[in-house]
Amino acid sequence: MSTDLTEALEDYLEAVYDIIDVKGGVRVKDIAERLHVKNSSVTVALRNLRDTGFINYEPYGVISLTESGFDEARRLSETHQVFRRFFVRILGVGKEAADETACRLEHTMAPEVMARFLQFMKFITTNRAIDEQWGEAFKQFCRTNDVSPGYLASPVNYMNDKTRVSQESGNGFD
Amino acid sequence: MSTDLTEALEDYLEAVYDIIDVKGGVRVKDIAERLHVKNSSVTVALRNLRDTGFINYEPYGVISLTESGFDEARRLSETHQVFRRFFVRILGVGKEAADETACRLEHTMAPEVMARFLQFMKFITTNRAIDEQWGEAFKQFCRTNDVSPGYLASPVNYMNDKTRVSQESGNGFD
DNA sequence: TAATAATCTTAGCGTAATCTAACAATACGA
DNA sequence: TCGTATTGTTAGATTACGCTAAGATTATTA
């Protein structure tokens, strides 16, 4: 999307990020298990991510994220969470299916759609009691909560962020 | 998803379907333009779809869908339309971005998520005036409008279908 | 600490999908 | 109908990514 990484490599990068986040470190084995591939596939991918500057890594050595790797991985991970939340909370989908699908969507949303979707999520999660015509309410919400331009920069708190609101440009409904 | 076709081949198959639908026939060139690939790539894909029984085709000859090819393509195309509609009508996304993303999603939704999403779409398109708490309304809707089991068979009219309703099993919210 | 287990890497292979370049078939206009 | 333009095919190269098998390294434990 905003990198030259393939989808597969984005998955590896995100796995590194998430596993470090949870366990404090990553092993080749952890990544292989998470992505359902063999260790040897992980090794190749890690070499690739090292060559493109997203991780620090040498054979048999410690795996860590570079600064750009961290930023990119965080973006991916948080995008994943947004979808996951939508699937689980709104659609009522099981966590497994939600995760699997979210993992795919990270790579497949056009930026414009992604921006809109984040708006949508914000809308439905900050308006738990909707007491007027749903469509109009959402349109109105979009008019005053356009997050499109900046979502790539820091998508962290879109679910409950009170600060990141701006109102430039059109919102696609007009 | 429900075939052994790769995502790329599904795209080719859907292109054949859609172009025939619009123009009454398909040329290699048409497919190449639509999918942004070279003619030679199309030729290879068509041979593949012929070998797997989805299309009738011979070099320099007419391209048509077999029965299974038609069924499969229709399913893909209609799934595409559901997402496209969501992006355009609900999210207010531009048609191009909507199409591009919908094209990806066809292949990447776990069946459970797909089923839920169709429910969701039906909900928001048949309840234009939502006058009660949104989350509860949707949950209730899901309880009495479970389309999960049958969506693969004939997803044609889910946007405004009054007949395809059943209420077996859980709906994921309980 | 030496043997064994676990983990990781390398090398080589297979498949899918794309491309370019050269060639073949078809369509069309003079 | 001949010649050119358009369209389609084939062959071969490339890239991405997975796998297996074999070997290297590191960890464990007797």
Image (spheres, coloured by chain):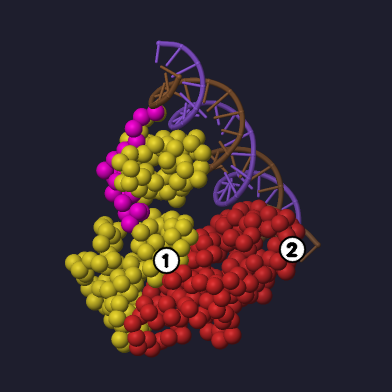
Chain colours: A red, B yellow, C brown, D purple
Screen quadrant of the N terminus of chain A: bottom right
At horizontal 57% and vertical 57% (from top left) the residue drawn is A7
Residue under label 2: A56
The magenta span reads B60-78
| Image position of B85 with respect to A126: above or below | above
Magenta highlight on residue B79:
no
Mark 1 falls within which chain? B
- Which image quadrant is residue B164 in? bottom left
Q: Is residue B73 visible?
A: yes
Q: Among all residues in the image, which is located at the extreme left?
A: B163
- Circle 1: element type: helix
| Image position of B96 with respect to B62: above or below | below
Residue under label 1: B87
Give the residue type that dot 2 points to. Asn
At horizontal 50% and vertical 81% (from top left) the residue drawn is A144
* Residue C28: x %, y % from top left: 40, 26
Q: Nearer the viewer, mark 2 or mark 1?
A: 1
- Circle 2: element type: strand
Give the residue type that dot 1 points to. Phe
Q: Residues within 10 Å of mark 1 (few under 14, many from 20)?
A: many
At horizontal 18% and vertical 67% (from top left) the residue drawn is B163
The residue closer to the viewer here, A61 or B19, is B19
